[in-house]
Every structure is written in C-alpha cells, then in structure tokens.
Image (tube, rainbow, N blue to C red):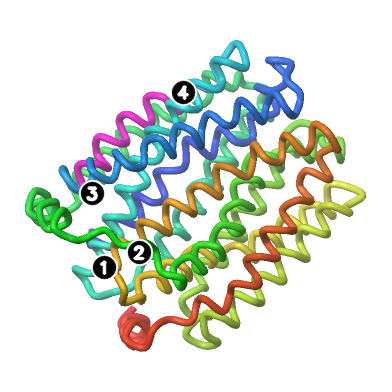
Amino acid sequence: MSFQRLVMLIFFLQPIAFGSWLPRIPDVQAKLGMGPADLAIALLGLPIGTLMTLPFAGRLVAKIGGRATIIYGFVAFLAVASLPAFADSMTTLFFTLMILGVTLSTLELGLNVEADRAEKTTGLMIMSRCHGFWSLGIMAGSLLGVGAAALHLPANWSLALIALLVLPIALFVSARLPLGPDPAAETSHAKSAPFKLPSAALLGICAFTFGITMTEGAIADWSAVYLRDVLFATGALTGLGYSVFACLVATGRFGGDYMKSRFGAVVIARVCGCASLTGMVIVLLAPNTAVALIGFAAIGVGVSVGFPLAVTASASLTDRPAASSVAILTFIALSGFLVGPPAIGFVAEAFGLRVGLGILLIPLAVSLLFTRMLIPSAAGDASSVVSDKAA
C-alpha cells in the first residue's frame, strides 16, 4: 500500500473510538444525573488535557518523529478511550476526559505531521482527503455508538470493545509507515530557528478556522443532547444528528480539492459559510427531528472544507516555515473544537439549549467575514495548482 493510502487509512481509524463515545454522552449524563452546566464543566476536561499537552507533544513529535508518535499514541489513546463511560461522578468524568485529551492531542499531532511528510515525499496534496477519511472514521464510530445504544448495550463496555477491536488494526497499519528522516537532525534544525510572532495574515486565517472548528466540536458533543432534550427524540434517533453531520462533512471534504480548483478557495469558503449559517438557523427553529437533521446536514457541508482550506492558505505564507504556520493553525483549530462544547453548556444552563447552540451563529459569522484571508500567496498558489493537477 502506498504511503498516501496508509496515512489516509490511519486518519480513518484514529477517530472511530472517539466517535463511538459521542452518541453515548446523553446516557452518561443521565446516569450521573448532571444538568447542562455540570456536563459543561465535565467536558472541560478534554480541552484542558489537550491544551496543556500540545507544547510538550510538539517536542515529543520533533524528537521521535510522526511515525513513532502514531504507534505509541494509538496504544495510549485506545487504552483510555472508554474511561469516560466508566465515570461514576462529574469529577471522575472530568479527569478521565482530561486524560483522553492528553493522548488524543498527541496522536492527532502525529497524524498531521505524517500527512505533511507524505505530501512532501510524494508531491501530491492529500491533506483534504486525509481529513475526509477522518470524518468518515468519526461517522463510523458514531454509527457504532448509535447501534450499541439501539441494542441497549452498556456504554462503558461497548466503548471498551470498540477500542479493543481497533487497536490491532491501527498498530498493523501504523507499523507499515515508511521510516522518515532522523528526528534528532530535524529537532536540531528547529532549535536554530528564531521565534516569530504570528503575522496578521496567519491570525486572520486562524480567526476563520476557529469558528469552523468550534462548530464541529459543538455539534459533536451537543447534537445528541439537543435532539433528546429539545426535540424529544428517543433511542438511536438521538445519535443520528451527528451521524448525518459527519457524513456530509466527509462528502464535502472528498469533493473539496475539485471544487477549489474550479471556483477558488474564497468562493467555496463563502458558499460553505452561508450553508453553515443557514443550517444552524434550521436546527434552532426545527419543530421536529426530521427538520433538524436537514439542518445538521447543511452545517456539515458548510464546515467541511474550512480546515483543509486554512491549512493550504497558512502553508502558503512566506513569513515563516510552512510547518510552523500549520502548527499554530492546528493549535487554534483544536482550541475551537474543544472550547465550544463547554461554552454552550454554560449558556444552555441559564437560557436553554436552543440559545446555547444559537451562540454558534456568532463565530460562524466571524468565519464568513475572514474568508478573504484564504487567498494564498503567489508562490503558494502556484505550488497549490501544480499539486492539484498532480493529484
């Protein structure tokens, strides 16, 4: 199997266990008797674990390389993936999610490093498709979670079983990744580079990305709860909102490279931005589950290509190495993905979940305003066109 296909397969495998957790959040919430604010506090464990780890994870990846990070990361991540479902209190849920965030952020950083290495090694742009396979993986995981809920299987043991099944496959595929350059030499070179503050262009791209990923994280954590508590969906129907959303995200990402080459990054970003805003309004005004699913589908299309477009735009900037720009962008993107859910919970506790989800209209509008920052530099645009044709 080629380098590119190995990386895409790993992107698919990585989020399956995490995706199977998302539809079971309402079950764990009900078991622990938590309200929206309590759940929001518990969910803070994931972003805290992630953000406190990223500076150290970057050094680890630089020291041992992306391939080794992925192999060891899968072992650590899948070993703790089911722990939140075993929580017996809000405090336990918080700390198990924090542990999960530590392992998740390290593994995902290794994945992005390997995707970047695959692009540079083969000369083919695969980042958008890699994230498309990630979306397929989290959709597959969420469907597994929905199926387990429909069969009335306990959340804790069903999540543990899914993680156990994914582990040997993930290790087998990861071990087949080609060896990269000496990480020590890469680290030595990185240490010699002077520190520079992010440019205004990079900050603008990050502002565009934050609203996109904040919405992704919010839909992941709150769509099932919204369908259950606001629209009174029951059983497996509560998890369908995220499954539909993830399916459309994957579809949009697989078509993203073609659409970008035909219409340009800014036009696609603006059309998708309007779609996400429209979809959010539909969800907020939906009288029943069927209409809400249409809204979740529109949001999925709207946010699908945001992060891949931002990666390309940030890598085209010439004020710093491309890897450095993408690393800053990834940090902001993860921050949006993980900060959104707790923020919604606090608002929902005071004003209800419709209003809580409604705050996403603000960051989505900000993202729409910053789409103009996706115009790549001349050099970056030229290389992008060549890579698109090669792909």
Mark 3 residue element: helix
Magenta segment, prevailing SS (helix, strand or loop)? helix
> The residue under label 1 is which amino acid type?
Pro
Q: Are marks 1 and 2 in contact (CB under 8 Å)?
A: yes
1 or 3: tag closer to the N-terminus:
3
**Mark 1 closeness class: few <14, some 14–19, many ≥20 residues within 10 Å:** few
* Residue that extends furthest to the top in the rendered view of this protein: 88
Quarter containing the N terminus: bottom left
3 or 4: tag closer to the N-terminus:
3
- In magenta, the rendered stretch is 67-81
Q: Are marks 3 and 2 in contact (CB under 8 Å)?
A: no
> The residue under label 3 is which amino acid type?
Gly
Mark 2 residue element: helix
> Residue at horizontal 44%, vertical 68%?
202
4 or 1: tag closer to the N-terminus:
4
| Residue labelled with disc 2 | 325
Q: Which mark is residue 387?
A: none
Looking at the image, residue 96 sits to the left or right of residue 68; the answer is right
Mark 1 residue element: loop
75 is within the stretch colored magenta: yes
> The residue under label 2 is which amino acid type?
Ser
Q: Which mark is residue 66?
A: 3
Mark 4 residue element: helix
| Residue labelled with disc 4 | 160
